[in-house]
Image (cartoon, helix red, strand yellow):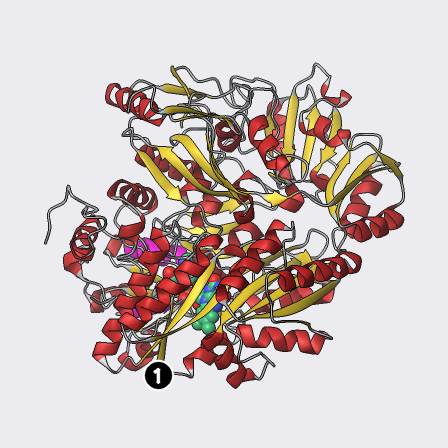
Amino acid sequence: MSFMFDERLDGALPTVDKAAVTSRLHEVLPHMTLLSEPEDLRPFECDGLSAYRTVPMLVAMPERIEQVQTLMRECRALNVPVVTRGAGTGLSGGALPLERGLLLVMSKFKSILSIDPEARLARVQPGVRNLAISEAAAPFGLYYAPDPSSQIACSIGGNVAENAGGVHCLKYGLTVHNVMALEVVTLEGERLTLGSEALDAPGFDLLALMMGSEGMLGVVVEITVRLLPRPEVAKVLMASFDDVSKAGGAVADIIAGGIIPGGLEMMDNLAIRAAENFVHADYPVEAAAILLCELDGVDEDVHEQCRQVREICAAAGATDVRQARDEQERARFWAGRKAAFPAVGRLAPDYYCMDGTIPRHRLPEVLHGIADLAEEYELQVANVFHAGDGNMHPLILFDASDDDQRERAEVLGGRILELCVEVGGSITGEHGVGREKINQMCSQFNSHEIECFHAVKRAFDPAGLLNPGKNIPTLARCAEYGGLHVHHGELPFPELERF
Amino acid sequence: MSELSSRRRDSADGVLADDSAALCEQVGEASAKGTPLAIVGGNSKAFYGRPVTGEALDVRGHRGIVHYDPVELIVTVRCGTPLSELEATLAQNGQQLAFEPPRFAPGATVGGMVACGLSGPRRPWAGAVRDHVLGTRLITGEGRQLRLGGEVMKNVAGYDVSRLVTGALGSLGVITEVSLKVLPQPPQGMTLRLELDAERAARNLAEWGRQPLPLSGACHDGEALHVRLEGGEGSIRRAREQLGGEQVSAAFWEALREQQLPFFNDPRPLWRCSLPATAPGLALAGDWLIDWAGAQRWLKSDAEPAHIRATVSEAGGHATCFTPNAASPFTPLPRALLHYHRRLKAELDPAGIFNPGRWYAEL
Ligand SMILES: Cc1cc2nc3c(=O)[nH]c(=O)nc-3n(C[C@H](O)[C@H](O)[C@H](O)COP(=O)(O)OP(=O)(O)OC[C@H]3O[C@@H](n4cnc5c(N)ncnc54)[C@H](O)[C@@H]3O)c2cc1C
């Protein structure tokens, strides 16, 4: 199994004449940066799923919306597949290039067009970094709420395409809840305005449809986000547990108590130790699990909620509950969590980050299931968990230069996702399907559901030129995959011919 | 499954009845024959949109709460369930639909709520219906029921068809079941009435919006500004001191949501103007009631529809006629956008049977 494009399963790609496309694009877009030399193309060969690489045929770097429109029209006329790329931090291979395709890099769209403190809106170009929006809004006491751990690097366009989340999503929502409007260019070169500065727009909610659509339906060229006033205070509590089930119980009890924390994160022992070694966050390295619970809002309310959460954690069996004494300590508690991926990454040459979601109450059994699977495949797994909204990030440690380990890591990852689906969850909460989870789509959805997704895709891109092979598997792929993974003695696609 | 065995009574949650097989069958037949279907729930929002001529597809028999675990903050409910029943069950557990959906009639169903996508006074702070939709079951063109999205808070597998069909007025398929995010009721609430004119109120609201105040409602009814505070005791006390005004009954918000305030008792057509909250007052003849801190403005006016639309569009918004108006209740779409609407409709409803023409004549 591999994540590389496979024409036998993913559909035939058009044959493209690189020289002809290059000269035509030079002719119609003389001022656009177009890279075609191997050494210039190399830096774009992968995204954050870096074990998988393909050098694109061409890289285009437009800087104006009209250029994107022309480029799309030309690619459509010349039958050239287009893969859009933001900052390339995606973890599912969504921006993995095609050997016979053009990579549309949006990094020159990097202006913050306006900040309107009265209306609490920011209008930005897609290449703007997530954190840069909050930095620009800070002088007005405002910020942009979704805060993926990659926020210093990832682009807001990529956030839209993945419907990115962060540690504050339970209370403040995902990207979909914080974007007011988009300008999108379709493959036909049409420019659409979706949403508006009002709270709704006439017609279908194409704004919502575009969120998390992984560059399959159009290119996002402008984004209007809403800004929130900075909470007056934010306090963070760290509770330690000698058993992950008890930590899971505490999460349920906090929510049952009517409290929606600003952030509610869990880490298991391996993740705790890795983070502690990396950033010295003052984490309890003996604990089986820690919970980080941030409470924010108005001083009086936060004070009261901190008291409640301390009591709930103690009653749930916490061995220790600490409240950060000051802003410095609070930042330190979070630093460990925010650096969890790179920290775990130091434990092995490579790590593979999973992104399944589950109903929260199934957490203990899923963690045990993951531990059993890790043993079966002889690999280590650390767990980082957006506990408040049931989004798990098991991190599989492996060495990509060892083919056997890489193969085992892939299979183990797939098995973990299937476990999430079995307990009623989803294969991806925020990182997207991309190339990485293309097979597991077949275990989450049946052929009719997958066909419905293809129908949506056809409405925007009948020729299938935008990001082919990503996000939605072909039924042929599902048939082959179904042959490998028989569930409950039933083939998922009995009606289809096997390869 | 026989009619008998598919229906069971659940004393706590009212009736739990699975009518989906019959609904799929009716859709399948209609699709084969090309018979247009008019999807009906409680008929409480029949005025919303253009009239549909078609065979009635009554979804009220498909009802009941399928799954509700308050600790997960998620409820899964069938489309024919009365909204009142769902909200009562949530309230028993100290929870609510934060977007405060209007009912407009006692029989309003959950399916209609999702299909119309209308939200109440808390919308600017809590989000709209679509912001709380996590998953749906949907009967599409071929009469098959699909499961889209899911019963988890976060899910980016596949396109977000559940949110696409929210507010799509039943024109892309029959929503048979929906999973919704629910939230705890706020511990405390308070309603204040402040004697301010609309302009002054708008200025104050813009200012307050940048402060961490526990606002969850802001409506100027032509005479005074009504503000709702929701949160902990401490934050409400402090906000009350800051804002001043007199404390009044919270019943105002329900009357506003259900359009039962005296303002709505007026024979002139009712327009809903959705605008950027900070858009200045519009020069249109008629009376205004300004909700959503300025983002949803109700207008009672005899002015020409085209004039109203043009004025609202000019200010960055769109206007919908809430008084039955056969011709065109919704603001027409720009050409390119309409093109993709039609393509989506053709892909998901190839036979063109679901509520044809309810949005626009062309859809
Ligand atoms: C250390 C680390 C931590 C992370 N933490 C989080 C986290 O906490 N939460 C989270 O959600 N994600 C996280 N991510 C994943 C990643 O940062 C997000 O998915 C991010 O949204 C990707 O943005 P990008 O600009 O890098 O997009 P890319 O990787 O360049 O592209 C991602 C997808 O978006 C499409 N795309 C990009 N720009 C556009 C555009 N303008 N128009 C249309 N399509 C476009 C691409 O085709 C591709 O399918 C993390 C990644 C890393 C490496």
Q: Whole-percent x and y of residue A479?
A: 17, 50
Ligand 1 occupies quarter: bottom left
Q: Whole-percent x and y of residue A396?
A: 36, 73
Amino acid on which the number 1 mark rests in the picture: Pro
Q: Whole-percent x and y of residue A429?
A: 43, 57
Image quarter of residue A336: bottom right
Dot 1 corresponds to which residue? A349
Chain of the residue where label 1 is placed in the rendered structure: A
Could you tell me which secondary element the residue under label 1 belongs to?
loop
Q: Which residues are magenta?
A: A58-75
Position of the N terminus of chain A by quadrant: bottom left
Residue at left 65%, top 19%? B269
Say above or below: A340 vs B175. Answer: below
Q: Is residue A180 magenta?
A: no
Say above or below: B17 vs A467. Answer: above
Q: Residues within 10 Å of mark 1 (few under 14, many from 20)?
A: few
Instruction: Report the front residue among B288 and A333.
Output: A333
Image quarter of residue B224: top right
The answer, for residue A490, to whether it is visible in the render is yes
